[in-house]
Amino acid sequence: MKVIEVQNVFLKYPSSKYDTIRGITFDVRQGEIFGFLGPSGAGKSTMQKILTGTLRDYRGSVRVFGTEMKHRAHDYYEHIGVDFEFPNFYSKFTAMENLTYFASLYSRRTSDPLELLEKVGLQHDGYKKVSSYSKGMKMRLGFVRSLLHDPKLLFLDEPTSGLDPANARILKDMILEQKKMGKTILLTTHNMHDAEELCDRVAFIAGGTIKAIDTPHALRKCKADTKVEYRFLDNEKEKQNVCALSDLAHAEDFQAALQKGTLTSIHSKEQTLEDIFIELTGRGL
């Protein structure tokens, strides 16, 4: 089942001469983690604002849960969770007071805020004012806020930004846990490692248009054969060579070193998502 259906969408901000979003088309299926991958200013956040109902002056069609976003019902926000890259909180309130207040805005029963804080390692900071929180702590707090009401659809904007590797791992594991529960997730990021690890499919977006959509694996494999770099001893001197993986069986120096036992190292040099993005757009992530 398609949870999100976007057809030929354009959007121009009133202060701009040109469209920021230009002819975007894609869909997201239930239980899928779909990633928007692109540099700052590519149109990722604008597309997310359209999908979350913040921007409604678009042309084309944007349907979520089968309803055109221009005509969304008031209970739309009961079913989605949004985690912004720069989350806003009441800084003079504690984390628990913030979560308790936001939980009161929903008509449905919400999760225990303290249990969510414990999952992201903030249980001992729950009664501290948010004004004392670091950026990483606010990012974790923003993430659990988006989960309070057990939404069916999650919009995550750079969820691991500003986090150390350990806390980023915790959030990524929680995102994958949400997927296992059947949630649909739209992940906006310029972090190729997060996209490759988490996403079922990704869309490359640059200049307000989508340049490619596919699985991370398919995108990495579509442009060029994997390169293999190997080193070997020749007359007691180490030499190095690189060839395509498909040509390795015909590389005479490699085969000779393999038979003589003089091969000293070998490793593949697969293209990254960023390599592919640069090939398609001429821009880095």
Image (spheres, rainbow, N blue to C red):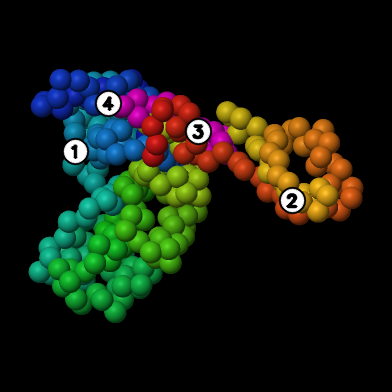
Give the residue at mark 4: 21
Q: Residue at x 48, y 28 (%)?
A: 279
Q: Residues within 10 Å of mark 2 (few under 14, many from 20)?
A: few
Q: Position of residue 116 (x, y in %)?
A: 33, 68
Q: CA distance from mark 1 to mark 4?
A: 15 Å
Q: Amino acid at mark 2?
A: Glu
Regarding mark 2 in the picture, which secondary structure is present there? strand
- Of the numbered discs 1 and 2, the one sitting upstream in the chain is 1
Q: Position of residue 166 (x, y in %)?
A: 43, 67
**Do residues under tags 3 and 2 come within 8 Å of each other at their CB atoms?**
no
Q: Nearer the viewer, mark 1 or mark 2?
A: 2
Give the residue at mark 1: 54
Q: CA distance from mark 4 to mark 3?
A: 22 Å
- In terms of image quadrants, where is residue 150? bottom left
Q: Amino acid at mark 1?
A: Thr
- Of the numbered discs 3 and 2, the one sitting upstream in the chain is 2
Give the residue at mark 2: 238
Regarding mark 1 in the picture, which secondary structure is present there? loop
Q: Nearer the viewer, mark 4 or mark 3?
A: 3
Q: Residues within 10 Å of mark 1 (few under 14, many from 20)?
A: few
Q: Amino acid at mark 4?
A: Ile
Magenta range: 206-220
Q: Is residue 257 magenta?
A: no
Is residue 115 something one can see in this rendering?
Answer: no
Q: Position of residue 8 (x, y in %)?
A: 33, 20
Q: Which mark is residue 164?
A: none
- Of the numbered discs 4 and 2, the one sitting upstream in the chain is 4
